[in-house]
Amino acid sequence: MDKLREFLRLEASGGIILLAVAALALVLDNSPLSWIYDGLIETPVEVRIGALELAKPLLLWVNDGLMAVFFLLVGLEIKREVRRGHLAAWNQAALPVVAAVGGMLIPALVYWTVNRGSPATLAGWAIPAATDIAFALGVLSVLGSRVPVALKIFLLALAITDDLGAIVIIALFYTANLSAISLALAAAAIAALVVMNLAGVVRVGAYAIVGTVLWFCVLKSGVHATLAGVAIGLAIPLDDRRVGSPLEHLEEMLHP
């Protein structure tokens, strides 16, 4: 047990686990035991409170739930770096944004150029525009201290800008039915988070309650729920005058 705790404290442990289980999933899904893998990710998981129901397969709870928590942590790190770290200067913050825009436009243009004569495949132009931030950070974490902190922050900022762009693309070009009511409620929840921040609310629990409402509304709106994680992360207070602000406390809690 002590060996396990020691391993989990390593910076590289998350990346090692991520890469190992990804390899295992690839092997399992391409073997005679693929029915186990398919059955696992399609396992129905349901949460119901009165008439309020959220029923999805396990795969979507990972994609829309756990990934939203991951993006919450990313949002916290980005805010801290913008306020007092490697992205505090405008020229430093602008570089990953420009790189992310180029990283979306160029692959999409290459895809369009190759597939412009094939209407059946042309609709997939947005697929190469997205960056898999989890795997990118996983690889960097395995390399540990050999990777400069500035490179990790650059990748974080690039990937989060890229993912937000991908979410906008999906919402504009690939979502058949957006819920105006859910979007309006999500906007109200974001406004509430901003008001709480400006009013000096420091209890993480209060942000968690409003953030959960925001996540649910974004999920039901038809827009990818990871956007809620980023919004919550950016709303958590960071007091530059003292150590141990709510943002740093929550970041420390989520890192394991």
Image (spheres, rainbow, N blue to C red):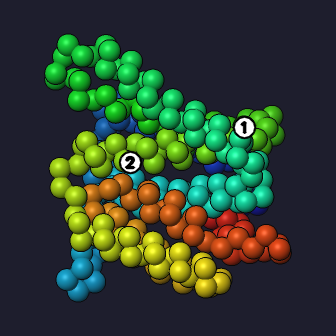
What x and y, as percent, mark residue 194?
53, 75
Q: Is residue 221 above or below residue 213?
A: above
Q: Residues within 10 Å of mark 2 (few under 14, many from 20)?
A: some
Q: Position of residue 47 (x, y in %)?
A: 30, 74
Between 228 and 143, the one lying in front of the other is 228
Q: Residue furthest front?
A: 90
- Out of 246 and 6, give the one closest to the viewer: 246
Residue 53 appears anywhere in the view: yes
Label 2, secondary structure: give it: helix
| Callout 2 amino acid | Ile
Please determine whether, in this image, residue 164 is positioned above or below residue 98: below
Sequence-first tag of 1 and 2: 1
Q: Residue at x 32, y 15 (%)?
A: 113
For the C terminus, the image quarter is: bottom right
The residue at which mark 2 appears reads as 167
Asked if 198 appears above or below 256 in the picture, the reply is below
Quick one: quadrant of the N terminus?
A: bottom right
The residue that appears at 36% across and 70% down in the rendered structure is 186
Evaluate whether residue 24 shows in this view: no
Q: Quadrant for residue 99, please give it.
A: top right
Q: Residue at x 38, y 48 (%)?
A: 167
Left or right, residue 67 beside residue 46: right
Residue 162 percent across, percent down from the top left: 49, 41
**Residue wearing tag 1:** 151
x 35%, y 20%: residue:
111
112 lies above or below 43: above
Query: What secondary structure is found at the residue carrying circle 1?
Result: helix
Q: Pick whichever, 239 or 217, lies toward us.
A: 239
The amino acid marked with disc number 1 is Leu
The quadrant holding residue 183 is: bottom left
Cα separation, mark 1 vs mark 2, equals: 24 Å
